Image: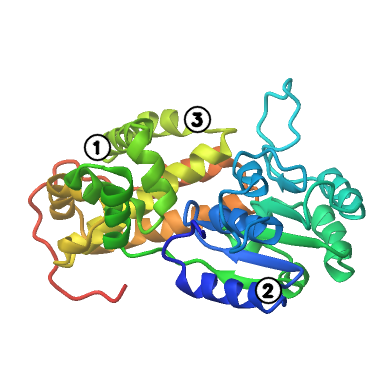
Amino acid sequence: MWRTVGQYEALALIEHSFKGSSLAHAYLFVGPPHVGKTTLALDLAQAVNCQGDEPPCGECNSCRRIINGKHVDIITISLDSGRDSKETKPRVEISIDDIRELQHSASLPPYEGECKVFIIDGAEYLSVEAANCLLKVLEEPPPRVIMLLLTADEARLLPTVVSRCQRMELKPIPSEDVERVLVESRGVDRERARLLAQLSEGCLGWALMASVDDRYLQKRGKRLAELLPLLDAGWEERFAYAAQFEKDRGSVEEIIKLWLVWWRDLMLTKCGCKQAITNVDCALEIENWAMALSLLEIKDFIDSLQKSLSQISRNVNLRLVFEVLMLDMPRREGRQGRETLSMPVTL
């Protein structure tokens, strides 16, 4: 039973290739975080190692061991894999040592299954040396080995790596489908399910995690609560806020992406499209902000947020990126009630 939801094109292609014994030796799954890349990767790993009559059955010993993370022939490599317990700093790249270990393991036959499956989760974090080392495996793939590269930022991958994989794009699924899964499969209250579906932006994995762990919504609320006062804050307060993220790349990316969605909601509201906003529980606050800021200010700051994400991907100094954002962020102090622009905008 395929557990992947909503990715009909990708599933159809993989099922057709699997039934026709024409699976590629390497796949590149492209899509935003929590859209289902890992679920699809594990589904495929189950299918090629399933002992049931209709793979993936999800019930045989092999399928259960894969889902429980105990199958020795399913190896996941990510920023968190192989970390020493004494390491205090988060890793910023997948190293060449990780890929050399993969290369050695791939040269050995499967131990308990039919096929070895290597899942590189966050392939955009491969160092240049690691990516070039991986090329050797992709160019001369060992038998009974499948490589699955998962990425949320395809542009950061070496073109030579991309060209040696079968690319599959996993797109955000409609919020109605996310809401339906939450209600029917997880028993989530419909009102809460509707909010989570909107906030998930089509990424079912995030909605599922947030439905059972309140910390996801609490973290979002905390981040937004920190953002709101910054519009009225002075430079000293803004720079003090920026200083706390000097070394935490993950938090910086997370905050900027959250802000990007919030400021997009501001623009939609400013243009009379508030029914399309994501942060539906903040509709009144967003409307008040939209009245206080000009359309040009909102658009310019969205451009600054997008530019900052691009800079972070190139390992620019995090504190500097945030300080520039604090300089670019407009101020609304004393401007509540400003007349809104009514001209249409092409997004």
Task: Give the image quarter of residue 224.
Answer: top left
Q: What amino acid is labelled 2 in the image?
A: Gln
**Regarding mark 1 in the picture, which secondary structure is present there?**
loop
Whether residue 263 is visible to the viewer of this picture, yes or no, is no
- The 10 Å Cα crowd at callout 2, few under 14, some 14 to 19, many 20 or more, is some
Residue 210 vs 137, above or below: the answer is above
Q: Which residue is mark 1?
A: 232
Residue at the farthest front position:
53
Q: Nearer the viewer, residue 233 or 59?
A: 59
Q: Which mark is residue 243?
A: 3
Q: What amino acid is labelled 1 in the image?
A: Asp
Left/right placement of residue 192 relative to residue 316 reads left
**Regarding mark 2 in the picture, which secondary structure is present there?**
strand
Q: Nearer the viewer, residue 193 or 337?
A: 193
Whether residue 115 is visible to the viewer of this picture, yes or no, is yes
- Distance CA(mark 1)–CA(mark 2): 49 Å
- The 10 Å Cα crowd at callout 1, few under 14, some 14 to 19, many 20 or more, is some
Q: Which residue is mark 2?
A: 166
Q: Nearer the viewer, mark 3 or mark 2?
A: 2
